Structures are given as structure tokens and as C-alpha cells.
Image (cartoon, coloured by chain):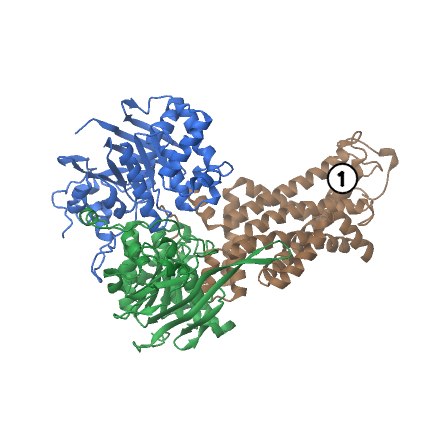
Amino acid sequence: MSYSPAATDNSVPILKVRELKVHFPVKRGLIFQRTVGVVKAVDGVDIEIKHGETLGLVGESGSGKTTLGRAVLRLNDTSGGSISYSGQDVLALRGGEMRRLRKNIGMVFQDPYGSLNPRMTVGNIVAEPMLVHKIFDNKLAIRNRVMELFDTVGLNRSMASRYPHEFSGGQRQRVGIARALASGPNILICDEPVSALDVSIQAQIISLFDRLKLEQQLTYLFIAHDLSVVRHVSDVVAVMYLGKIVEQGNADDIYRSPQHPYTQALLSAVPIPDPAVERKRSRTVLKGDIPSPLNPPSGCVFSPRCPIAEDRCFVEAPMSRTLSDGRRAACHKV
Amino acid sequence: MTEALLTVENLHTQFRTEGGVVQAVDDVSFNIQAGETFALVGESGCGKSVTALSIMGLIPNPPGEITSGSIEFDGVDLLQVSSTEMRSIRGSKIGMIFQEPMSSLNPVLTIESQLAEPLKIHIGLSSAAANDRAQELIDMVGIPDSKTRLKQYPHELSGGQRQRIMIAMAMACTPRLLIADEATTALDVTIQAQILDLMQEVTEKSGAALLIITHNLGIVARYADRVAVMYAGKLREVGDASDIYAASQHPYTVGLLRSVPRLDSEKGTPLSPIGGEIPDLTNLPGGCAFNPRCQWAVDRCSIEEPELIEIAQGKQVACFEHASVSLSV
Amino acid sequence: MTVTSDLGNEWQLTPPLSTRLRGMFGATVKAAKRDIVLGVSISLLLLGLFLAVFGPTLARTDYERTDPVNRMLPPSAEHWFGTDNWGRDVFDRTIVGTRLSFLVGFSVTLISTVIGVAIALVISYFRILDAIMMRFVDGFLAFPTILLALALISLIGPSIGNVIIALSITATAGKIRLVRGAVLSLRESTYVEAARAVGVPVPRILMLHVLPNIVSIIIVQATFTLASAILAEASLSFLGAGVPEYVPSWGNIIATGQGYIQVGFHISFFPGLFLTVTVLAVVLIGDSIRDHLDPKLRGRLKTTTH
């Protein structure tokens, strides 16, 4: 395939995020707006994804995982730090260069109903990235490629001239995936791609992601709140809480022996669909609510809910440290 | 087995839609024992929520209508009582919690007045007594700082706390049955665990039965004693939770269990999703509605509708091929 | 889901313009045949256009000459719509007036819609431009339309062209405000974000993702503008800022008849009827275009007729 650039060196990260900050000012007032606070949606985040790898980004609402994913595509402004995509400084890109970046990084959205233009046929939706990036110079080639993509994601070719409202949620999500693949990206950012779907359809879409990864050597940034789904797709996992990554490392290690108390609590909160296992599990149920990102706790952001917090946790924010098995965790007590 | 608290028999609920009449609940029968936790599981459009609304007498008419069947609760047929009686049963003997607490709470009334109101109406408490009881309830559902919380409005609380308030309201008159319709679907996992634990705790303490309606098989496994699986308006399998998960004999249940990724499975375990789409209720396939997606389907399945039959003590399955269906294939 | 559409009709990436136009024409004819209301509306509008072009040649009397002897006659075989306070034939004046009313109504609608939508689309993407433009718009909207048009005409002089210009400017301000609001809310929609995420440039986003989804709002607003422009022309003429009283337009005739509504109801009634029918026809056609452009509604129309 002529359009897929070959960055196949597996040791060098294809996407590298350093100390990334995305802060949203909160403004009040109609004419004379004043800033009354700052939401630190993403606050000093480091992640790396190697070529062909899947990084699962998990967290609850308000953790900043979606904002992080959007920031990689420059869909929202950043306040500090750096993002590099195969050595290129993403935050320095302007206009046309930025659009070229979006050719190499595809995105799949959560809402299968809202993410497709209701006035366009799904064929045109899938063809659009190829048109805007001028990947082919004739319409026949684009048409053939659209048909290929329909095959790839498991849609019937004859459906190309239909409109989104004629499709079910699962089918729409397949259209969204075909669109994301159309420009031949290296990385796919999937933002909660299955959480709006029914259980049996979720499995179909996850299997599609599995297959695409094998067939096209795709790299994924897979954002989700469902830890079971992330477990299934990820090689590396990063756990976010209130704008910070609290633990990050090899997926098997983290799921087998979570080190950060938040990761532990999160994993034990997820029920396993097997009563035999479930009734033997010992669980830690966290107290309290997720604090508002507008007014995060001092010290460690997790301290008010942490079952093992001690005095210094409420004062001093822990640095992220590398543990013996190579994973990183931000906790004084690990 | 003791006398059932709730017995639903041959319930039929239909809706008139643009595409024609839809049989949202089609000949559903099950019972719930006093004090047990019963789960109704299924995907969107399977009729699980309509079943709950039918029990509560909350089917909007038109377009909906319960066309036949009976719902016997505590010795009374809920389909025969007047709407006034039904309202009083709803407030005092059956409590219900919905997915979106904000739509069930009045945004312009304080938590206190919303909690105290049903106590005054249904139990006839005085204002002062009702307010005291409201505070007790808030303490019971684990909301810290109850005095100030009572004076607040719903929008000042987090999603999890609102759901706690809903539980407090539902439990205010110590009902015999608590229905939770996707009550934790909109919540984060750590909050979800809190709320479900709380529901189990309060119902256990008061001896009420709990009917959990969900699509989440993990929640069912953790909390339910018995499970009923619904698909396209019909019950497909009913039985003890442990038995269903270990040895389901309906292809749909088996398919669901195989298609959910598990936290404790080995990395790289492939999923085996159920193929095809969830059918449109206005255009159901002939015979068993699941047959086009079923790997065990035989010729008969597309012609004849299988009945829900008891194949063992306390276990019912609606499948012609149930003898050959198993999880380990 | 029952899908009605065309299996034989293969998907094509943007077919050539001629094919699309032919398709549109064919679809219109087909829709008009199927839908009596739409067919009647189109016929009425075509009749109006015919009158607008040939009205003056169809007049049987000198519609500008006064005839005091025959004033205020009720409708009769000779004067179908009666005569007015100067004895002029109302039927002739009404059909001749069609030209002016159509000219003002459609010009103002077309100009204000095209310019208003274009400005709204552009400013919604440039924050500073938006802030400046919207203050202007607010200023314009603070005055009643007629007052503003009067002021403009006193600046540039009374003539039918200037009436069109003045009314277009005030109508444009309203359009900008309305469309801008719709664009701003659409811009937050996931599919516009998805388009940005695949690298679609801003002009293409505006034309392909935003514009088609606000068409229904634009059409509804346009039908409203048409009716109000025809009436506004009358008010301006009545105040001496438009065409002289003896030149017939629907608005002019209605304004004339207003003073005699108790004794000569017919003077205002007939041009009023023409105006109502025209606006109704345009509204109905607008409705049908909107339905036709919405794939969701289009599907439903097909299923009901099969």
C-alpha cells in the first residue's frame, strides 16, 4: 500500500508525550470576563507508545483521559509540555502540517450516533479523508478503496449509498472505524469506542480492533473506563486520576499486581462475570466521590479517598517513580 | 420454596410505534421470593425495563399497554387495583431507582422536603417526625454531613450522592421490593461498587427483595441470587446465578458470557462475539428470535417458537437444542 | 431495520453536476405528482411568476388612470375585484402589482439569505470578526425594520432598487444572528469534530458538514423574510419612501384599501389573498424541500408511499 509510511523500528516510541498540561480557564462574567479558576484536566502527563503497541488509558470521569487523547490530535489547546509523533514536534505544527498529522493519526469516537454527519452517505463519509488528503488522484481509485475499507470493517458494500440513520449503533461504529482508517494512519486514537454499544456488539467491535492490529500493524491509544475491555486490548496500561497518571506499565503486571492504591481499588471494583470467582474475591470499596477537577485536593490527588494515606500524602504530591519491574507509579507508599 | 413475593404471569406489554405494534414484553413469567436478589439481564430493546415499568404500573398509555397477564404482589394483583391504590403501593411497598437520578428529583425542592414528603403522605408522620426520619435515612445511605446536605438542592450533589438520595427515598417507607433499573450504569466503577453494595446492604437489613435490571453480567454475578435472561421481549433462561454462569444451556446466554472480556482472563484470549445484529422488534425473525445469530440453530428454530420449560429444579430454558448447548465448546 | 433504498443504485463519489441537477428536477416532478399540496403550491407560484412577467399586458383597463364616477364599486362581472377609491380596477392593479411584489420579496429573500448565511458561516470561525460583526448586527436589530429602511432610503433616495437594498440590509442582520447561533452549536457536534480530526480544512467543514445541517433553519427563515419583505415594501411606499401610490404593488393596494376597510372591504381583500396564497405556497414548498434534503425524512416518505 503506497500511502502507508513505514515507521517500523519497534524500539523507538512512535508517540511520546512529555509533561503535558491541558488547563482550561473557568471564566465568569458576560462582557468583562475574568478567570475565576483553572481546571487542570491534564496535569503533567508522560506517556510513550511504541510502534505496533496498544496503550490502554483508563480512568473515571474527570480523569482527563479524553482531553489527553484530543490533545494528541491538537483538537484542544495545550498549556505546556510536549508531544512528538515519530520525532516530529506536534505542538509546533501549523495549518497544513497539522492536517497532515491528522492523516497519520486516526480517531474513533465514542458516540456512534453523533459522530457521523447525518446528511452524508456513509460512502462519502469514508471517502472524505482520502479526498482532503489527496491520497488518490482519481475517483475510481477512491471508490475502490472505500469498498475495500467496507470489506475490512465488515460492512456490506451495497450499503455505501445509505445514510447513517439507516444503520445500527454497531454498524455506525464500523463506519467510524473505516473513516479513521481511510487515510492510512499509523496510530488510531480510540476514545471509548465501545462504551455506547450493547454487550454482544461490543465484542464484535473489539474483535475488529484485534484483527486490524494484526493485519495492519496499527498502534492504538485506547481510551476507556471499562477495565475489562482495556485488559483485553492493551499491551501497556496507564491509569489516570484527576489529570495525573498514577500508575503505568506492562498490562499483565498491572492487572496481576496493581501497586498504586487507586489501581487496586479500581480493579477490585470491577465485577467479574462469574459468581464462583466473584464470591471469593476480597474487595476494597473506596469511600467518597471523585473530587471536582476545579478544586483538586492538595498533596496527592488521591489522598482523601486513599485507604492507606498517611500525613505526608495530604501535603506533598508524590513523584512518579520507576519500580523494579519497569512500571511507574506515583505514590509515597509504593 | 416459600410463598413468592412477586409473581409475574404471562405478562404481555405492547407499544404502538410508527413501524407497527411492538410486543416489548411477550409472555413473561417469573417470580421473586421475599428477600432474594433477582436480576433481569439483557441488551437494549430486550424488554427488561418495560417489564419493570409494567410491575410499577408506569407504562405510558398511549402508546404502551399491558394487554394480558397478571402481576401478583404480596397477595394483590397489581393489574386489577385502582390507580390511587397503585400509587400508594408504589410509594410504600415497592421502591424504584432509575438510571438518571436527576430526572426523578425535583430541582427546585431541597433534599429534605423531597425525602419527607412521602413519609407524610404514606405513613402520616408529622412534619417534625418526617424531617427526623429524613435525616436518619440520609445517614443510612452513607452521606456524610447529613444536616447540611438535607438543606441542599439536587444539583449541589454528585451523581453518586444523588443515587444515594434515590435509595433513601425508595427505602423511606421500608418497601418489600426494591427495583433498580440500570441504576448504576451512568456511574463510575468505584462509585458503582459503592451504590450496589449499599443497595444490597439496605435490602438485606430490611428484608426487602431486590430486582436488579442491568446489561452488565459482572454486576449480576456479584450480587444476584437468581437470574433471568431476556432477548427480544421474551425470557430465554431463568435459574440460579451460579448455575447459569457455570452451565448455561441457552445459546444467547452462552454467547453473552463468551463475548464479554474478563478482568481475570489471560492476555490474548480471543473473544467469541455473537454475530449479527440485535433484531428490530417491528421485524422479528420467524420462530425463535435468536435463531439467525445462533450457532446451534436447526431447521425447526426458524419455524417454531420454543417454550420456556423447566429442565431441572429451578432452571428454565427456552431452546429446542438446550441439551447440546454448553459453555465449553 | 427495514431499508427501502436502492440496491441497484450504486454509491458514487460526488456525481457530476448535470446528473445531480437532472436528478433534482426529476425528483421534484415526481414529488409534485405524488403530493397534491406540493403540486398545487408549485403551480400557484408558477402562475404568480407568469403574472409578474405578463401582468401589465394582461390588464384590460388603464390601471393608473382615476375614474371618480366608478369609485368604490363592489366586485361585479365588469370589475371582478371591484374598484378602489379612485375608481381604478382592483383586479388589474393586483395582477400588475404582482411584478413589484415578487421582485421585492424574492430579491430581498435571496440577497439577505445568501449574504447573511455566508457572513454567519465565516464569522463563526473567527472570534474577533465575530465580536465586531455581532455588535453591528445588534445595533441594526435594535431599530424597527421600517425605521431603519426609512433612514437608509432618505440617505440614498427613494426607488424600487433602494427599497430592495434597504430591506435586504435589515433582513441580513436578522439572518446573521440566527444562522450564527445554529452554526456555533453545530460546531460542537461530534461529527464536525470528527471532520476536524481527519484533517478536513475549515471551508470544507463549513460547506459540507455545517451548511447542509442548518438548511431547514435557513428555509424556514427565508419564507418568513419573503412575506415580511412584501409587506414592508407596502409600508415604505405608503410612507412615500418606495414607489408612488399610483404604481401598483400588492402592498400599495392593501395600504390604500386600509382606509376604506369598512366601506370597501374588497380593495384590501384581493391583493391580501394573493399575498397569503403566495406566502403559503412558498412555505409549503420550503417545507417539502426541507423534508427532501433530510435523509431521515426522505426515507420515511419513501416507506409511506411504497
Pinpoint the chain carrying mark 1. C
Chain A shown in which color? green
Quarter of the rendering occupied by the C terminus of chain A: bottom left
Quarter of the rendering occupied by the N terminus of chain A: bottom left
Residue B311, position as x, y percentages in the image: 13, 36
Residue C79, position as x, y percentages in the image: 77, 35
Q: Where C300 sits versus B120, above or below?
A: below
Report the front residue among A2 and C253.
A2
Chain C shown in which color? brown
Chain that is blue in the image: B
Disc 1 residue type (three-letter): Ile
Residue tagged 1: C254
Query: Toward which corner of the image does residue B200 lie, by quadrant?
Result: top left
Residue B161, position as x, y percentages in the image: 40, 44
Residue B150, position as x, y percentages in the image: 46, 38
Look at 57% across and 49% down and name the residue there.
C217
